[in-house]
Amino acid sequence: MTAYTRPGRLDRQMAFLAEADALKGVQRLNVLMDRSRRENVAEHSWHVALWALILSPDMPAGCDLSRAIAMLLIHDIVEIDAGDHPVDIAHDPHDIARKEHAAAIRLFGLLPPDQGAGLMALWREFEGNATPTARYAKRIDHMQPILQVFLAPDWEPGHAEVAAHTLTEGRARYMARDWPTLDAQARARMAGDTAPGGPLAARLAFLAEADQLKTVIRATLALNGARRENSAEHSWHVALYALILAEHAPAPVDPAKVITKLLLHDLVEIDAGDAPVFGNVDTAAIEVAEAAAADRLFGLLPDGEGGPLHALWCEFEANATPEARFAKSLDRFNPPNQNIAAGGGSWIEYGVTRAIFDTTVGAKIEAGAPILWQWIAPKAYAVIDRLQSERA
């Protein structure tokens, strides 16, 4: 029996993923490194998951990287209901814990019971901070906002003081003991001194460069059509799709490898920009620009570390392995769901018809995830047909 013959399961998974879109509307205290705006929790969740991947050479013994990344993809999803709580404002921790637990019950309860229970256990493990994997994920969640301040060319007024207090007296004060090399990097930058060089400094330079993905705007609308999304929050959302929907791949896949590809897949847009799938673009020129961007960006990493990640990106682009095909399908499957939620979204702008949709999007979804294509096709056609009727 295929998953599609049990539509209730996929319906519940998609209800959860649709609800997750709301995380893109939850604002944090931190600003982007170019100081253009405050960041949202979805793009933060992508960035810390990327941090876990890039800093994995420093993982403690007994840490499960794929589990740490999964934790960071979901760790703040409770803020859809409970909100974000800036570290510079006093809060009642018991009240926050109560609200977040209630949010976890509601949100993970949208999923099929077995999957919801698994994610609830993962979230509780992160919150408990008692396993090597949870401690690694927590350290990154605590340090990433601090270094987002101190790695920026210019510091947002007041934010350096908040970051310094968090590092020296607040929730990250234990880092001098638990991760002294990362703590030293932060303290040197905080003091305006030359930070220690070496592999960790190169990894941080790559992660700082990655912050620019939050400024790359896509054609697809987020938040039920309220605004266009950016490529960082898209990367988080589609990685979450992989975490939830891996069972629907037509051939067995390694979910961790699919998630890793999707965390990395759009980094090249920092240099090459986003190319709207329905736009009139020069595909050959885009491929050249993206290849050059991949060379530059992965080249920022230490020898022996950038190459394997570059190879994963190339594997995604080549679309020749089961993981790559499934990842590509998810990358095409996510935007139509958002367009449907927005009443047509970017399909209105580009005058999308069934034929255009089938050729540009449908064929790619069906090639790597036929069950997902069967699920979404009638929903997409209903909206596209309505739009075409309104244009007539």
Image (cartoon, rainbow, N blue to C red):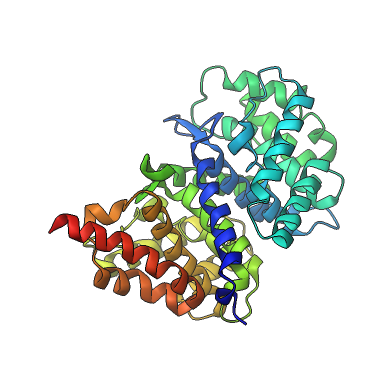
In the displayed structure, 249 sits above or below 222; it is below
Q: In the rendered image, which quarter is residue 308 located in?
A: bottom right
Question: Where does the image place residue 40, in percent across and percent down from the top left?
Answer: 52, 36
Horizontal relation, residue 177 to residue 326: left or right: right
* Front-most of residues 58 and 372: 372
The residue positioned 64% from the left and 46% from the top of the image is: 107
Horizontal relation, residue 285 to residue 317: left or right: left
Is residue 207 at all visible to an observer of this figure? yes
Horizontal relation, residue 343 to residue 368: left or right: left
The residue positioned 49% from the left and 81% from the top of the image is: 320
Question: Where does the image place residue 63, in percent across and percent down from the top left?
Answer: 81, 56
In the displayed structure, 318 sits above or below 381; it is below
Which quarter of the figure is the C terminus placed in?
Answer: bottom left
The residue positioned 85% from the left and 36% from the top of the image is: 177
Question: Where does the image place residue 242, in percent across and percent down from the top left?
Answer: 58, 63
Question: Where does the image place residue 47, in percent across and percent down from the top left?
Answer: 57, 46
Q: How many marks?
A: 0
In the displayed structure, 356 sits above or below 12; it is below
Which quarter of the figure is the N terminus placed in?
Answer: bottom right
* Front-most of residues 247 and 252: 247
Is residue 193 at all visible to an observer of this figure? no
Q: In the rendered image, which quarter is residue 215 located in?
A: top left
* Front-most of residues 221 and 150: 221
